[in-house]
Structures are given as C-alpha cells and as structure tokens.
Image: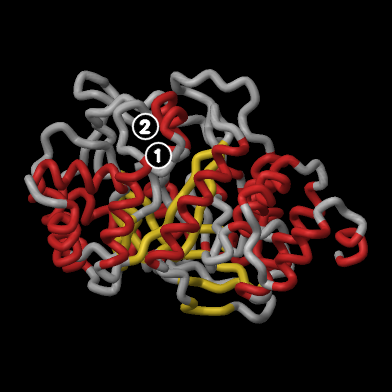
Amino acid sequence: MKFFVQRSELRDIYDKVVSGERISETDALRLFESKDLNTVGAIADLARQRKVGNRASYIINRYINYSNYCILSCQFCSFARKKRDADGFQFSVEEIVQKAREALHLGLTELHIVGGLHPSLPFSYYLDMLKALKALDSRLQLKCFTAIEILHLAWLGKKTVEQTLRELKSAGLDSLTGGGAEIFRKEVRSAIAKGKESAEEYLDVHRTWHKMGGRSTCTMLFGHVESLADRVDHLRQLRALQDETHGFVGFVPLPYQPENNEIPVQHPPTGYDALRTIAVSRIFLDNFDHITAYWVGLGVKLAQVALSYGADDLHGTIIEEHIFHMAGAKSPQLQTEAEMVKLIHEAGRTPVQRNTFYEPLKQWDGPHLPEPAVNGNKSIVLEKNLATA
C-alpha cells in the first residue's frame, strides 16, 4: 500500500492519517472528488485497522416496524402510508411481543424498532410496548425510535424531549436508532423531507440522550440531490457532536434507494460511490470507533467488499426489513448468523458477534461456522415465516 500511496496526489492526507492528525473538510472533499478509489480505500483501511485490528462484527437482531402510518409525507419515503391506504399496517403490543418471542429461538440479542409518526396511537402504547418486550426477556437490548419519533412522542405526551427520553428509558429503552439524519443541509432536507425535523433538532435529541448516559448510532442518506460538499458538512456536524458527547457507537452510511418515491434521481448511488462514501467516512470520522456497511442497502457482496474500504461491521441478521425493501432494495430479507460469519471470513477478517453497543460477545477464530439456533427444517420454516410476516 505504501508504495502507491507515496506516488498519489493524496499522499499528504495519508501522512496525516499515519501521524494520527485529523483531516480537514477540504481534505474530505478532495477524497470524495478523487478518482483514485483504491488509494482512498487503502487510507481508510489503515484507519480501520488502527481502530479495530482485523476484526469485523455483526449482530443477531430482528427488525420490527410497529406501523407505517405517518402524518408526514417525506418525498423520498416509500414506507409511509395514510389511514386510507390499503397497504398500511399497525401492530398491537401483543403482536409485537409475539414476533419477538418467535425470533428469540434464533438467538437474537437486539430488537430494532421504528415506525411512522402514527396519527392516533397514544404515548402509553410506546411505554407498554417497551415494558412488555423487557418482560419477555430482560437481556434483550431494545434499540428503538428515530429522533423525529422522539419529537413526535414528546408532542404526544406534552413533555420535553428529556422528560420523554427518561420515561422511555425507565420503560426499557436501551439505545436510540440513528435513522432520519438524511442530509443536514437545510435546502436538501426541504427538497427530500419537507416538514421533518431540522438538523439541529436531530442532533439535539441525540445530544440530550447522550448527556443522560445513553448511546446511539447515526446515519447519512446519500446519493440523491445532495452535493459532495453537503456530505462533508453532514459528517462535520456528526464529528462535532461526537467530540462533545462521545455518545455515538457507530456510523451507518445509507445509499439512497431510487424506486417508489417522488424524488427523480438520474444517477442513483453506484457501488463506486458507496465504497468511497464509506471510505471517506472512516477517514474523516476519527472519533468514531465503528463504520457499518449496511448490507440491506448495499447488497451482501458489496458490503463484503466494503470491509476493505473502511467498514468494520456488516450490521445484523435483520430477519424482517420493510423500509429499504419498500423503496426497491433487492437484497434478501434476512441473513443467518452462519452466512454473516462466512462473509466476514471470506473477506479475510475475524468475525465477532457484537451487541447493540458494538461490544464483542463471541469471536470466531477458526474456520468453523456457527450451528443454526434451531435445528433442521424447523429453522428454515421459522425464518421464512418471519421474513414474510
């Protein structure tokens, strides 16, 4: 690597990373604009190795969307529905608990729960949901709600954001999700998600949660109407909040899915763009320990390649994902633990099962794959039912 980096126009940025010096916004824009993807990837891989060594992680989790009814009409969203729509849905607390109960047989450690801004569900519904899931298994880590959902719940309960978060935490909330960040620049947010929370509001929800001792992830939706400079500005604001609170456990760049929405995009994000975005994120976000290659949006093969371009995590088994698939994602509905371990092994990394906070639970040092959590055909049938529920 050192030989071709020394001959690159990016040599000065490489030297900064080697010496542990923080790169600037100008440096980040140069990395985005460079046509030398291999060098950008090599620099990112160096930064990754310094953070985590040769390990790459995954989590055994299940997605649950409690409802897709939403009072907003974000232009990019293919998930939200109005009450009049035939394909809208909402689950009772009992139905959500049953989904979680079934998935426990697969050995999951996390439930990832988000939904639309429901027009009529009371605040008590969300508290009851968290309490019921914790009662099912207290070891389950509940990673729930985006920043805009928290603002919606605060409005429902006529409480401050802090009061709302404290009540949710008391009911069982372990972590906030990072969804809804999109792109922070005001003009871009107005173009793709008019009426959604501002960048300042998104950051303040996470700031408040972090100051309470909570942890969360954060995201960036890229490849629609934003510029490369907008991406750098987005990363800058995340890095600044992380300097302040140290509350983010990981960053998840999300490639825009161009189908089934109201934003015409002539050139949706390519594999090249996804890899450079992951790589630049790894280099610029020097105060983040983990960068996730979200296989649902990238596809499993490209996510695997991303492990050599700065990513050190493949996210989770998922089991049932609606938001990206309703937007046109062609990836599978789930990955088994054995498949995740194999993908990481093939990329030359040491697979590590993690929890919600990216803390290691189990490391696979040898070539052996994990046994299915449920043996025989019962496991296959269960997973199929969950994926199509």
Q: Position of residue 146 (x, y in %)?
A: 32, 48
Q: Position of residue 125 (x, y in %)?
A: 11, 48
Residue shown at the point (44%, 60%) measured from the top left: 379
Which is more foreground, mark 1 or mark 2?
2
- Up/down of 232 relative to 71, above or below: below
Can residue 349 be spotted in the picture? yes
Q: First in sequence: mark 1 or mark 2? A: 2
- Up/down of 169 relative to 281, above or below: below
Q: How is colour applied across the structure in the image? A: secondary structure
Determine whether, in the image, residue 190 is placed left or right of residue 306: left
Query: Which SS class for mark 2?
Result: loop
Q: Amino acid at mark 2?
A: Phe
Residue shown at the point (34%, 26%) measured from the top left: 194
Q: Residues within 10 Å of mark 2 (few under 14, many from 20)?
A: many
Q: Nearest the camera: 283 or 369?
A: 283
For the residues labelled 1 and 2, the Cα–Cα distance comes to 7 Å
Q: Are marks 1 and 2 in contact (CB under 8 Å)?
A: yes
Q: Quadrant of the N terminus?
A: bottom right
Residue 10 appears in which quarter of the rendering?
A: bottom right
Residue tagged 2: 79
Q: Position of residue 320 (x, y in %)?
A: 40, 47
Residue tagged 1: 322
